[in-house]
Every structure is written in structure tokens, then in C-alpha cells.
């Protein structure tokens, strides 16, 4: 459990720790929020198990589906989910558009309050003129994803398998369990991620597991919370791709990393 304050439970689940949700639930809990797929590791959280636990509780269930909406569909069909947040640019919709999907429970919608005020658009939840071109673009992107998600998943899974196979040649350690076919986080013992990013310039655009400012580097809070060693975190490299990625230069990536060993 990441935190449990003000009647809200934010979940950071690893493996079978979903049982911790049972212990955290109390009568005053009003919302349980889960990141469906972690953006750093790609780990897929057990939405169905969480839904089953909440079946006998009145708390609203929110799923942050930024990484999964339109890609990993079936978990999101679960009728116990009350709220789903999605981001358009993850589906190649225009940037600047997203959605909060609400499901009515017993014909009553979740009791949301507006963050800012003005006109009565969106039933009083969000004032302002709607960006129709962005909405239309997001709608078309959702339609294409609904139609092609299985085919896309098969393609990106093949890309991931090839990359994992190649990286084993350099002794890579893979971070995260039950991960998305669109994301891979790995660390090569003895290789610093900053050095790897420089070495991979022109081959692949990757990122490391560190959040940084212009003057300060701090370890990723996600990887730190997983209890990983400082060495593993320092070497963490995140790679992601899409259905539009024809191939990943796996062998070139490995050759570049070998130069750092």
C-alpha cells in the first residue's frame, strides 16, 4: 500500500501483495486508486483481484489506465471499476486530450466535484468550450485501438521477446513482473544507465530509471520502493515501443552496451 489518507487508498502492488488491500480497507475508505500498468517497469496490476476484494465494499474504484487504455483492454471491462482515466497521446491521438470515464453505480454517478468553475458544460464538472478536433481525434484513435488491439499486442510481444533474447547475451537483469508487451526495464551489471544512454545515441532513444532536475539526480521512487539495490537502480534502462515500431535494433543495442563492459 503506497498510502492511505483522507479516505483514499493508493495502491502500489507487487506480486501477491494485493492482500494488503484487505487489511487497509475500512468503512471510511471512499476511494481505491490503482495504476493499471506502471510507466517505468510496465508491471500490470491485478485489476480483477482488486475488483473482487472491493465487491463487498462501497469504495469507488479508480484505474489510471494511461499506459493500458486501448492496448490492454479486457481488464478495463470489469464492471466493478467506477472511474478510468486515459490519455489520448498514448494512442496517437492529438496531444492535449484525455478522458475520465465514469460508470454509474445503481444509476448514480460518482460524486465528483469540479476543480474550477465557470459555465455549465460537462454537467457542471468542467467549464469551457470543448476542443472538438481533439475529441474527434481521440475518438478515432480509440476506434482504431478497439479494432486492432489484439493484432498490435501480438506484434509488440514479438518485438519484446527478440529484445529480451538479445539482452541475455550481455547478462541483463529484467525489472518487474507480469509486464506489458510495450515496455521493458532492464539493468546490466557494471553498466551505468547514463553512460548507456550516451552510447546508444543514434541507435535507440531510451531513458533511465532516475528522475532528475538540471542540478540533481535522485533514484527512481518506483524502483526504490521495489527494494532494488542501488547498483541495479543506477543501471536501470527503460525501453518502450508501439505497434508502429517495425523492428527494434536489438543486436546494435547489445553491441553498444558490450563496449561499456
Image (tube, rainbow, N blue to C red):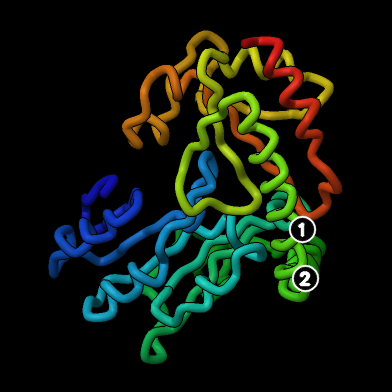
**Residue 41 appears left or right of 137:** left
Neighbour tally class for label 1: few under 14, some 14-19, many 20 plus, Cα within 10 Å: some
Relative to the observer, which residue lies in front, 196 or 116?
Answer: 196
Mark 2 lies on residue? 148
Quadrant position of residue 257: top right
Mark 2 vs mark 1: give the one in front.
1
Q: Residue at x 32, y 62 (%)?
A: 32
Mark 1 lies on residue? 155
Q: Is residue 259 visible?
A: yes
Relative to the observer, which residue lies in front, 108 or 233?
Answer: 233
Q: Quadrant of the C terminus?
A: top right
Residue 26 location (% of width, % of height): 13, 65
- SS of the residue under disc 2: helix
Residue ranking furthest to the bottom? 106
Q: Residue at x 82, y 63 (%)?
A: 133
How far is mark 2 from mark 1, CA to CA?
11 Å
Relative to the observer, which residue lies in front, 188 or 22?
Answer: 188
**Residue 229 appears left or right of 208:** left
Of the residues under marks 2 and 1, which one precedes in the sequence?
2
Relative to the observer, which residue lies in front, 150 or 222?
Answer: 150
Q: Is residue 108 above or below residue 74?
A: below
Residue 82 location (% of width, % of height): 42, 74
Q: Is residue 175 above or below residue 18?
A: above
Q: Is residue 135 visible?
A: no
Amino acid at each position: 500500500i503506497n498510502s492511505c489518507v483522507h479516505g483514499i487508498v493508493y495502491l502500489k502492488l507487487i506480486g501477491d501483495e494485493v492482500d494488503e488491500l484487505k487489511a487497509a480497507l475500512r468503512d471510511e475508505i471512499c476511494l481505491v486508486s490503482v495504476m493499471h500498468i506502471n510507466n517505468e517497469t510496465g508491471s500490470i496490476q491485478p485489476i480483477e483481484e482488486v475488483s473482487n476484494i472491493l465487491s463487498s465494499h462501497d469504495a469507488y474504484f479508480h484505474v489510471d489506465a494511461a499506459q493500458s487504455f486501448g492496448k490492454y483492454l479486457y481488464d478495463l471491462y470489469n464492471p466493478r471499476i467506477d472511474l478510468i482515466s486515459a490519455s489520448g497521446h498514448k494512442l496517437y491521438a492529438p496531444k492535449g486530450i484525455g478522458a475520465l470515464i465514469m460508470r454509474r453505480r445503481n444509476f448514480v454517478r460518482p460524486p465528483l466535484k469540479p476543480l474550477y468553475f465557470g459555465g455549465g458544460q460537462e454537467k457542471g464538472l468542467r467549464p469551457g468550450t470543448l476542443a472538438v478536433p481533439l475529441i474527434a481525434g481521440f475518438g478515432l484513435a480509440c476506434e482504431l485501438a478497439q479494432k486492432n488491439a489484439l493484432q498490435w499486442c501480438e506484434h509488440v510481444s514479438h518485438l519484446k521477446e527478440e529484445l529480451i533474447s538479445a539482452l541475455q547475451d550481455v547478462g541483463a537483469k529484467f525489472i518487474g513482473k507480469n509486464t506489458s508487451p510495450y515496455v521493458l526495464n532492464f539493468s546490466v551489471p557494471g553498466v551505468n544507465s547514463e553512460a548507456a544512454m550516451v552510447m546508444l545515441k543514434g541507435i535507440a532513444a531510451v531513458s533511465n530509471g532516475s528522475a532528475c532536475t538540471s542540478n540533481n539526480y535522485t533514484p527512481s521512487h518506483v524502483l526504490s520502493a521495489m527494494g532494488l539495490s542501488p547498483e541495479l537502480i543506477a543501471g536501470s534502462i527503460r525501453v518502450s515501443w508501439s505497434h508502429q515500431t517495425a523492428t527494434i535494433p536489438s543486436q546494435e543495442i547489445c553491441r553498444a552496451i558490450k563496449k561499456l563492459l
